[in-house]
Image (spheres, rainbow, N blue to C red):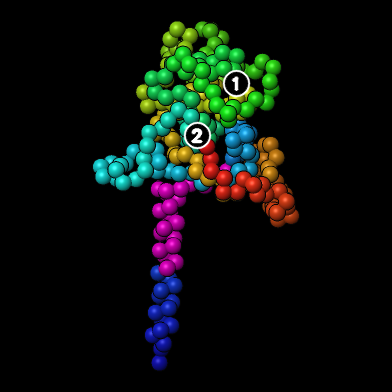
Amino acid sequence: MSDPHRKSSTRDTFESLIVTVVLAIFGTTFVVQAYKIPTGSMENTLLIGDHLLVNKFCFADQPGWLRRVLPYRNIQRGDIVVFKFPSTEAQEEPGTHLVKRVIGLPGDHLRIVHRQVYVNGKVFSGPYVHQTYPGEVRPGDDFPLPAGEVLPGSTLSWDESLSSYVKDGELVVPPDRYFVMGDNRENSWDSRFWGFVPRDLVSGRPLIIYWSYETPQGAYLRTSFSDRLSQTGDLLLHFFTKTRWRRTFKLVR
């Protein structure tokens, strides 16, 4: 005779597995997204090798009653956001996710003079701003540039359209667009070089660092099989010594 209890246990295990998979898919689709910091553009707020959980619903404008139930809010100046890269030109592939800090909101008037950011005529700064090359003149220290001048490293489409957003020497952020910059201002390829982030490309807001591992500059560019093998070996050998334990479960601000 067959054992009905064994059948029931097997069925329960299978159903639990299905529920777990469904919840995992739901969570990664609508609630959180894992993201790894590949460059130093957000130092020292976020370091190369920080692994983040991104809150995907805080900026997701929900219809009807969901808007009142879920903790949705508008994007604010100073927020760190994860978004899909908006341009098809240079350096990043379309759809690549980047992380930067929001500096200009729709309607804001913005200019940068000798690295000092002014928004609507007032200084906009914060303790998170990091300078790698103090005293040196770097591309992006002044923005927007006078008519006819091009910022080194900027995309062609941004060069061609930038003047249409400039009024009296200030950049005017259009509706449903955001101007973003990295906290490591001199080492950040951001809105100064490729333009605005459309609202519908914002994926969410970094919530917490769940793991941080010491990773060398440019490691994300080394994608060959031998590079991957070397990186895996390094992880196995140095997991405990290269993990930045003090950053584990650190909230992102």
Whole-percent x and y of residue 49? 63, 43
Report the front residue among 127 and 28. 127
Mark 2 surroundings: few (<14), some (14-19) or many (≥20) residues within 10 A: many
Q: Could you tell me how far apart the alpha carbons at marks 2 and 1 are, in whole angstroms?
A: 23 Å
Number of marks: 2
Residue 91 seen anywhere in this rendered image of the structure: no
At horizontal 68% and vertical 20% (from top left) the residue drawn is 134
Quarter occupied by the N terminus: bottom left
**For the magenta stretch, what is the residue range?**
16-36
- Queried whether the magenta region covers residue 6, the answer comes back as no
At horizontal 65% and vertical 18% (from top left) the residue drawn is 138
Whole-percent x and y of residue 111? 50, 15
The amino acid pointed to by label 1 is: Gly
- Compared with 214, 179 (above or below) is above
At horizontal 42% and vertical 19% (from top left) the residue drawn is 108
Report the front residue among 20 and 124. 124
Mark 1 surroundings: few (<14), some (14-19) or many (≥20) residues within 10 A: some
Left or right: 246 in relation to 85: right
- Compared with 242, 164 (above or below) is above
Q: Residue furthest front?
A: 127
Q: Main secondary structure of the magenta part?
A: helix
Whole-percent x and y of residue 248? 60, 48
Of labels 2 and 1, earlier in sequence is 2
The amino acid pointed to by label 2 is: Ile
Q: Which residue is mark 2?
A: 80
Q: Which residue is mark 1?
A: 153
